[in-house]
Image (cartoon, rainbow, N blue to C red):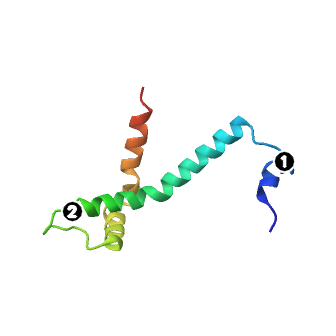
Amino acid sequence: MECKVAQVNGGDPARRLTTVEYLLSSMGAGCVTTLCTNPVWLIKTRLELQVPGKEPYKGFSDAVLTIARQEGLAGFYKVSLIYKTSKCRV
């Protein structure tokens, strides 16, 4: 398997990334991490906050299906967008 880093670095594996390249790669990694982990955290939090005797979700997979049906795909990311934009305010 060929090293993909050498292709990104213009074919020279010894070349170091510039500050802008590091910034862009870290921003990309942060976005991917948020997109992948936020639905898991949302479901975990909703399961933990259920009131005994009034559980809207029977388990993890039921929570995924219920949220997807009732709120759509955006339901998994609503809180994340609010949180991210509120932290950007100065």
Of callouts 2 and 1, which one flags the residue occurring earlier in the amino acid sequence?
A: 1
Residue situated furthest right in the rendering: 12
Q: Which quarter of the picture shows residue 4?
A: bottom right
Residue at (37%, 65%) from the top-left corner?
Answer: 68
Marks 2/1 in contact by CB < 8 Å: the verdict is: no
Which residue position is annotated with label 1?
14
The image quarter in which residue 66 lies: bottom left
The residue indicated by pointer 2 is 50
Residue at image coords 68%, 41%: 22
Tell me how far mark 2 sits from mark 1, CA to CA: 53 Å
Which quadrant is the N terminus positioned in? bottom right
Q: Position of residue 20 (x, y in %)?
A: 69, 36
Placement of 5 over or under 19, stated as above or below: below
Q: Position of residue 15 (x, y in %)?
A: 83, 44
Under circle 2, the secondary element is: loop
Question: Horizontal placement of 10 versus 26: left or right?
Answer: right
Amino acid type, residue under disc 1 in the picture: Ala
Q: Residues within 10 Å of mark 1 (few under 14, many from 20)?
A: few
Q: Disc 2 or disc 1, which is closer to the eye? A: 1
Find numbered disc 1 in the image and state the secondary structure of the residue it sits on. Answer: loop
Residue placed most toward the observer, 72 or 1: 1
Q: Residues within 10 Å of mark 2 (few under 14, many from 20)?
A: few
Q: Position of residue 12 (x, y in %)?
A: 86, 49
Q: Is residue 42 above or below residue 69?
A: above
Residue at image point 42% right, 29% down: 89
For badge 2, the amino acid type reads Gln
Quadrant where the C terminus is found in the figure: top left
